[in-house]
Amino acid sequence: MPAVSKGDGMRGLAVFISDIRNCKSKEAEIKRINKELANIRSKFKGDKALDGYSKKKYVCKLLFIFLLGHDIDFGHMEAVNLLSSNKYTEKQIGYLFISVLVNSNSELIRLINNGIKNDLSSRNPTFMCLALHCIANVGSREMAEAFAGEIPRILVAGDTMDSVKQSAALCLLRLYKTSPDLVLMGEWTSRVVHLLNDQHMGVVTAAISLITCLSQKNPDEFKTCVSLAVSRLSRIVSSASTDLQDYTYYFVPAPWLSCKLLRLLQCYPPPEDGAVKGRLVECLETILNKAQEPPKSKKVQHSNAKNAILFEAIALIIHYDSEPNLLVRACNQLGQFLQHRETNLRYLALESMCTLASSEFSHEAVKTHIETVINALKTERDVSVRQRAADLLYAMCDRSNAKQIVAEMLSYLETADYSIREEMVLKVAILAEKYAVDYSWYVDTILNLIRIAGDYVSEEVWYRVIQIVINRDDVQGYAAKTVFEALQAPACHENMVKVGGYILGEFGNLIAGDPRSSPLVQFNLLHSKFHLCSVPTRALLLSAYIKFINLFPETKSTIQEVLRSDSQIRNSDVELQQRAVEYLKLSSIASTDVLATVLEEMPPFPERESSILAKLKKKKGPGAVSSTEQEDGKREGGELNGGGERGADSTIAASNASTPSPSADLLGLRSSGPVSAAPPSAGSLLVDVFSEAGPAAPAAAVNDDGFLSSAPPSVVSEDPAPPMPQSDELLHKFVCKSNGVLFENQLLQIGVKSEYRQNLGRMYLFYGNKTSVQFVSFSTSVTYTGELQSHIHELSLNVQTKPVEPLVEGGAQVQQVINIECLTDFSDAPLLNIKFRYGGALQNLTLKLPVTVNKFFQPTEMVSHDFFQRWKQLSQPQQEAQKIFKASHGMDKEVLKGKRIMENFVCAGVIQTKAQQVGCLLRLEPNAQAQMYRLTLRSSKDTVSKRLCDLLAEQF
Amino acid sequence: AKSSRSNTVRQGKLRLQKWYTATAERDKKKMVRELMQVVLARKPKMCSFLEWRDLKIVYKRYASLYFCCAVEEQDNELITLEVIHRFVELLDKYFGSVCELDIIFNFEKAYFILDEFLMGGEIQDTSKKSVLKAIEQADLLQEVCDVHLGLL
């Protein structure tokens, strides 16, 4: 095609552009622009009506000025006039101006909408396309309101031109993205899905973007697209490179459409229909085979298009995660790319392998490439590629290669780009902790981290090493020795001083026997760093000193001397001064016993999720944790127990020092103190679970002593009735509920309110008398049955009930508080027996108390890789319990919506009991077609897996 | 490919930009500035993809022009690279060996071509012929109109 005449007729515009280009300075340019703006403004304001051509020219100039980066605050009206013109060229410029400059300006939108409405009904395909483009470009809610109903009709109408269909599909997509509530596909659904069969490849290409988006949101309604997509894909994949004419791109048949089809399939689980699935697997195999064929062209476009399809196919294979053969082939293919001369391919291969590493089928295959990846980390010239290599090493790390990978990452850290150092530090710290077999290796690694990249070691990292050292007495001596050695370096990082100060203050005694690290030597070493440190570190060191006085009485006078010096006791920093004063006083007046109590060794920290992991997640954004896990974790956690915030660390504070900001504060561990020390916080029922008088039970407490004896003997001697037949069903109602009506008959209603935290729970029972006659001799008791009784010495639950008043007036309600402590895991619920006399007749009923083991469940956040790793670790048959069952409530749309991996919900958590914590992993695979679920539970304890599986299976 | 925007940059001068998500004008300017810095700092032979904010940048340099697309996390990088190439091919075919000046002086045409190729960040048609045919038809309409105008 010959070059078109440029700027058709708009000479003024070309002149203006040349002027701007000829400007020698920024100032000159601004001057020229201002002149032009003034000119245009006066033209627009002038009384002489402008003809369409001039309007077009001026609007174009404004557009150009805008594109140079200047603000444009007028001309919109003229543009709207233009788009309502019936001259194509004016209309086009009008729409362009609106598209580029208007996001959503409600005043104008109404006028624009009018123009659009006219064009949409004009039946002129070119005008219709312009109007659709404008809607898609602006995409505002007002436009969605005006046109969301009309566009689906245009899209599926038999007489719509192909080009208009394409525009309509993408326009609708844009509206759906901005205002999904306004775009209702309803009756159009199946006709839209069938656009996948359209003869015109352009229509299919445009429509599939819309279908993919709709499928993600409403997978069920659009699921017929799976088989259509597979057959379309199969036709493309098996076609010769020239079959598709203009849709062949550098000898690759329809690469864009292929990628989109493969992406659409990733919205669904593997096809259930064997034939469809077979055909799809064949396609995937063909795509993998083609990667091995010699290229049909040397052009990079050919290989890019071909590999784009390949990577999308691999993404689908990983998404299915069910075809070991394909997964391993994908991994081998990516392995080849790892050494490809194209940087882009190396980058993508590293990235894609990261996801392969978390599949149990391909994890081992990925691991075989470790040397190549390490090499990439060392030799790649592009930092973004090195970053991918580091990510992959992190993802492929497990117990077998942790030492090698951590060592490589550490050595890379010495030269790593500043931009990724902090993340690298976090990763090393996490891997070192996760795969530590002996903790001396862990301590070495973290100290190395501080040595190599001290500036990038965040608080979380050094807090963590201290937590771990305190919790494991097998590593304390080693840690003391190692920090002592590390501190010998003339210049060591302040973080090292912090860790050193803390650890020597706690465990310096473990190495004090060696004269080379005698107490005084230790102290002098620490104190030699003191003056170079910042205030918080100095404060920490002062706490270490007072601990020294307790550990080593022989250092007392030296340290008191230091504390007494003006630079401490008169320090201008109030925190340091206070510490010096208080520690000095404490050491002089307290007896050895008191000192020993106050300065006792830190108690172990409660085990919980590593704060480093949380930090990495925060750094990486929500993407680091798959949305499925996060959401499910939350849902599960929120409903199964009423988890509240942890209490403050008063125990730690007391055990450490008496200053207002004790060293526990320095560690920032406020949030991990033992829960028993929680101070009352407003609104929590659980504050003092086992203290005497609960907030709502004063009446019961008063009667406490006399109750049993005052109750009529006839009632007490009456054996409790056997559990009612419906008690199991009632129990299941409360598995995921903490409040509600437990039981109701004509006489009595029993309501429940409960709250759980860790291994403790408090339940309120409300007994309502529905009659107008009083109940007398009202009594309740909680008993154990089954295994609970047989293990009497090893009670699973410690249940304390507060007695209720023996009289319940007609229409009145009495309340009973029950405190529950979970000692070990359990299967059977305790029985609640209720007896009373109503009009002389004895009522005796027994229910199951709605306490189930899942109430003591605490959700854990976990990245998908960790999840599957742990999943694998719990692979012994007795650790797993599985059930396949029919969905009893139908498949909840709300739950299915918005999940990328719909066939696989996972969640993780810990059952908190007094005796132990039992980690549990759950996987729920819905099969929407069959309306069945498969629920799999794995945990470190067989009884827990089994019980949870039984309980939860009833819930779907 | 859901490119939230694509644009063409030269030595710190923006020649063409298109946004496919609603963004405030101030944020746009900030993002453009930031993006230019990042992309212009890249050396040849580096890979064409980089992570930026929560998006992925796919860019390619043609002579003095950089073409950049910002796409979402799950989008396919290689095919986005070819989106850029196909756009350049379209410009080239339309203008007849396109150069930067063509894009400067006929920026509105460049927009029309881009719009004909991508809509709302998604590919409307991948066929070179179809896209160019649409543009040609529009040009034809334009001429008819101009003739019409001339007669008046």
Image: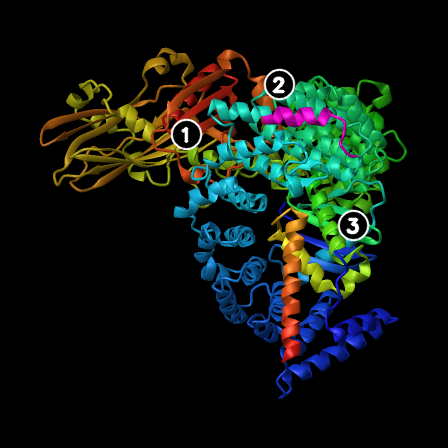
Disc 1 and disc 3 on one polypeptide chain: no
Residues drawn in magenta: A283-297
Residue A407 x, y percent position in the rendering:
79, 24
Residue bearing mark 1:
A929
Residue B68 x, y percent position in the rendering:
73, 50
Residue farthest front in this picture:
B151
Residue A112 x, y percent position in the rendering:
53, 68
Left or right: where A499 falls relative to A875? right
Residue A325: give its label: 2
Pointers 2 and 3 in contact (C-beta within 8 Å):
no
Residue in view at x 39 percent, y 34 percent: A891
Disc 1 and disc 2 on one polypeptide chain: yes
User: Is A544 in front, or is A184?
Assistant: A184
Identity of the amino acid at label 1? Gln
Quarter of the N terminus of chain A within the rendering? bottom right
Q: Is residue A220 above or below residue B39?
A: above
Residue bearing mark 3:
B38
Image quarter of residue A516: top right
Residue in view at x 37 percent, y 35 percent: A738
Identity of the amino acid at label 3? Val
**Distance between the Cα atoms at labels 2 and 3?**
41 Å
Q: Judge the density around disc 3: few (<14), some (14-19), many (≥20) Cα neighbours within 10 Å.
A: few
User: Is A540 in front, or is A304?
Assistant: A304
Please state the chain letter of the residue tagged with numbered disc 2 in the rendered image: A
Identity of the amino acid at label 2? Asn
Residue A466: give its label: none
Residue in view at x 48 percent, y 37 percent: A225
Image quarter of residue A14: bottom right
Q: Magenta span has A417? A: no
Question: Reading the chain from its start, which is encountered first: label 1 or label 2?
Answer: 2
